[in-house]
Image: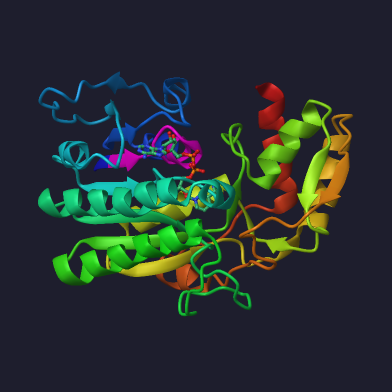
Amino acid sequence: MRWLITGGCGFLGTSVIKELAKDKENSFRVLDNLTVGTRKDLAGAIDFDEIDHSIEIPSLHKGECQLIIGDIRDSFLTNTACKNIDAIIHFAANTGVPNSVEDPRLDMECNVIGTFNMLEAARLHNVKRFVFASSGAPAGEVEPPIHEELPPHPVSPYGASKLAGEGYCSSYHKTFGIDTIALRFGNVYGPGSKHKSSVVAKFISLAMTGKRVEIYGDGSQTRDFIYIDDLVDAVIKAGTIEGIGGETFQIATARETTLNELMDILKSALKKHQIELDIKYGEKRLGDVMRNFSDTSKARDLLQWQINSTLNNGIEQTINYFKKL
Ligand SMILES: NC(=O)c1ccc[n+]([C@@H]2O[C@H](COP(=O)([O-])OP(=O)(O)OC[C@H]3O[C@@H](n4cnc5c(N)ncnc54)[C@H](O)[C@@H]3O)[C@@H](O)[C@H]2O)c1
C-alpha cells in the first residue's frame, strides 16, 4: 500500500512507519512541518528522500519513503501530498491540552482546518482510507469508562478540536464514502517519546537529569496509559481491516491508573538504575479531567485488537530507551 503519514516525523508516526516498513510492499509519503519531529527522527525509522513540492511529486515505488516538509494548514500542499495514495494516517496536530489552552486559535487551525484539508484532499484524490488520531479529550468530564457512545463534553480546546475532526471524519464517510476511522488514544508512552511532555516521558527525563517532577493536583487523577507497540498494532489494523469505515474506537488499556500508582511504578523501575524520583505536588491545571480510562471492547470485537504489554514492562522499556539517548 502507498501510505501518506501526516506528522510522520513524530512519536507515533515514526513508530508506525517502522512497523509498516517491515513489509517491503509498503511505501510512504510523510507530510510534516518539523515543528516537533525531525529529519533525524524519521531517519531512525526508515531511509527517505526529501521531496521538493514546488515541482511535480514523483510517484512512490515499493519500499520507498518520501518526506515533504510542509504544513497541513496549506490546502494546496495537502492536495499535492495526497496524489496516488491508498491510505492516510493523519497524525499531524497541535498535540495536548496545555498547548491548546495557551493558544486555542493555533490549536483550532491545525486540528480543525488541518484535518478538514486532509479530508478534502483525500476526497479530491479518491483516497479510500483515512485514519484519524483522536484522543480521550473529546469525551471530556464524563463518568468513565469512556466508550464510543457517550455524549462528548470536551473540557479543553484540544478536546473540542479533536471532536471537530471526528465529526468531519464521520461526515466524509457518510457523504463521500471515504473509509474514515477515528482512534481515540489513551496516554501513549514508550520508546520514541523523548520530546513528549506527557507524564511518563517528562518524568523519566527529568528524573534522569536529577530534576524534581511536579504533579498537578494530589495525584489521585487517573489516566489510561498505553504502550506504543499496542498502539501501533491498533493503528495498522485500523488502516487495513475492511468494513469499519465511519467508526470511532477507544484505543487504550481499559485500566485506570492514578498518577500516584504510576509514580510508585516509576520510582521502583528508576531505582534499579540508581535514579531517584523526587516528586512535588502543585496546583491542578486548567482543562485537565480528573478521571480517564476507556472501555475498549469495540476495538477488541471489530479490530480483533488486544493489549499485549503491561505497565511495569512498558515503563522498563521506556527507561531503557531514555538511558540509550
Ligand atoms: N502521544 C499521545 O499520547 C497521544 C494521545 C492522544 C492522541 N494523540 C494524537 O496522536 C497524534 C500524534 O501524536 P504524537 O505523540 O506522535 O505527536 P508528536 O508531536 O510527536 O508528532 C506530531 C508531528 O506532527 C508534526 N506537525 C505538527 N503540526 C503540524 C502541522 N500543522 N503541519 C504538519 N505537521 C505538523 C510535528 O512536527 C510532529 O512531527 C496527534 O494527532 C495527537 O493529538 C497522541
**Magenta stretch in the rendered image:** 4-16
In the image, residue 270 lies at what x, y percent? 83, 36
Left/right placement of residue 51 relative to residue 104 reads: left
Residue 244 shows up from this direction: no
130 within the magenta span? no
Left/right placement of residue 128 relative to residue 265 reads: left
Left/right placement of residue 149 relative to residue 287 reads: left
In the image, residue 60 lies at what x, y percent? 18, 31
Q: Residue at x 46, y 79 (%)?
A: 149
Q: For this rendering, which residue is in front, 212 or 1? A: 212
Quarter containing the C terminus = top right
Asked if 257 appears above or below 12 in the picture, the reply is: below
| Quadrant housing residue 318 | top right
Q: For this rendering, which residue is in front, 191 or 291? A: 291
Q: For this rendering, which residue is in front, 14 or 100? A: 100
In the image, residue 73 lies at what x, y percent? 29, 42
Quarter containing the N terminus = top left
